[in-house]
């Protein structure tokens, strides 16, 4: 009994140390955002500022058109999240419930695409969108991210855990596949769908490389791209950069804390049946 208690205590200690290690960059970001400019780069580093500079957040907000960036980020987040949910639901249902020729082969090929580095697709995607005339438009920020193989895989696994007897009973009652999907499968898959939506929202909100490539005007930039306003030829204003970064990351932290139970439930239940 004593060995078991010591073992649990050691595990908890490791988890606490790991958590503190993960939180360290966020704590440093917040501390730096509250420092004066002359305290940011001093050595040895100083964690607690001599005088808290709340004004850094106001200066950071007005240093660039962050109101415009915020609107763009929200539009891209909402549109891409809704779009991915729709494509994921339809594809996952087809791969889990509809028998068609080559289904398993096509699904295996889709899974294989997950091994392709995203950087490899940047140039082909950019050339395609350029030929369509979508560069520096919302289409370029939204359309390429309306589908996700990982999300399809996750929801397919969840759909497979739902008893087939439900679909048999629905078909006996004259229910079509489309109606069964939206009336039965989707409500039952709520935890998995919320998980997919949260992961997509966080990824869309924090995206930097792709929005930087396909936007060239201030009116189309998103929040992460707007952070480059604090890096100039004369140097980087780290206190303002950290203040802006804190403001950007705060909504996603709140979203994750509020809905984290759905992420755990969705991922856990998705692995019930392969």
Image: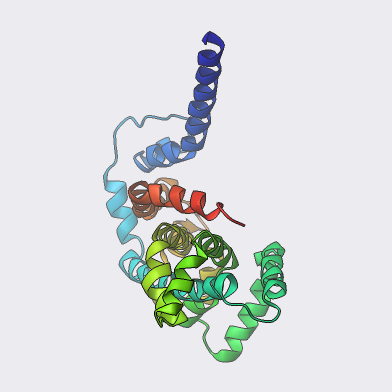
**Camera-nearest residue between 45 and 136:** 136
52 with respect to 204 (left or right): left
Instruction: Pinpoint residue 240: horizontal percent, then vertical percent.
Output: 38, 50
Give residue 113's quadrant in the image: bottom right
**Camera-nearest residue between 200 and 185:** 185
Give residue 147's quadrant in the image: bottom right
Instruction: Pinpoint residue 217: horizontal percent, then vertical percent.
Output: 45, 77
**Is 129 placed above or below 109 here?**
below
State the residue lying farthest toward the front: 172
The image's colouring method is rainbow
Residue 6 seen by the camera: yes
Instruction: Kindly identify the residue that appears in the image at 50 percent across and 79 percent down.
Output: 143
Instruction: Kindly identify the residue that appears in the image at 55 percent across and 72 percent down.
Output: 97
Instruction: Pinpoint residue 88: horizontal percent, then vertical percent.
Output: 51, 71
Residue 84 seen by the camera: no
Instruction: Kindly identify the residue that appears in the image at 66 percent across and 71 percent down.
Output: 107
**Camera-nearest residue between 95 and 19:** 95
Instruction: Kindly identify the residue that appears in the image at 48 percent across and 66 percent down.
Output: 165
Give residue 170's quadrant in the image: bottom left
- How many discs mark residues in the rendered view? 0
State the residue lying farthest toward the top: 2
**Camera-nearest residue between 55 and 205:** 205
120 with respect to 236 (left or right): right
**Is 33 placed above or below 113 here?**
above
Which quarter of the figure is the C terminus placed in? bottom right
């Amino acid at each position: 009994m004593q060995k078991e208690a010591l073992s649990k205590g050691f595990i908890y200690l490791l988890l606490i140390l790991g958590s503190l290690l993960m939180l360290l960059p966020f704590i440093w970001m917040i501390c730096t955002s509250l420092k004066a400019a002359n305290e940011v780069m001093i050595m040895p580093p100083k964690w607690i500022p001599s005088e808290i500079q709340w004004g850094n957040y106001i200066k950071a907000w007005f240093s660039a058109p962050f109101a415009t960036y915020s609107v763009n980020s929200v539009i891209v987040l909402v549109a891409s999240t809704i779009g991915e949910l729709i494509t994921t639901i339809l594809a996952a249902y087809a791969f889990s419930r509809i028998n068609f020729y080559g289904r398993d082969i096509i699904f295996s090929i889709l899974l294989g695409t997950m091994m392709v580095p995203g950087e490899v697709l940047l140039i082909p995607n950019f050339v395609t969108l350029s030929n369509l005339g979508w560069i520096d438009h919302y289409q370029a920020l939204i359309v390429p991210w309306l589908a996700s193989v990982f999300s399809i895989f996750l929801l397919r696994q969840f759909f497979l855990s739902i008893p087939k007897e439900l679909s048999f009973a629905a078909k006996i009652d004259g229910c079509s596949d489309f109606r069964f999907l939206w009336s039965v499968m989707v409500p039952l898959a709520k935890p998995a769908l919320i998980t997919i939506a949260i992961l997509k929202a966080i990824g869309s909100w924090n995206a930097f490389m792709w929005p930087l490539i396909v936007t060239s005007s201030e009116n189309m930039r998103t929040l992460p791209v707007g952070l480059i306003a604090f890096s100039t030829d004369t140097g980087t204003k780290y206190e303002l950069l950290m203040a802006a970064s804190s403001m950007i990351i705060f909504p996603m932290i709140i979203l994750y804390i509020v809905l984290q139970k759905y992420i755990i439930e969705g991922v856990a239940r998705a692995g019930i049946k392969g």
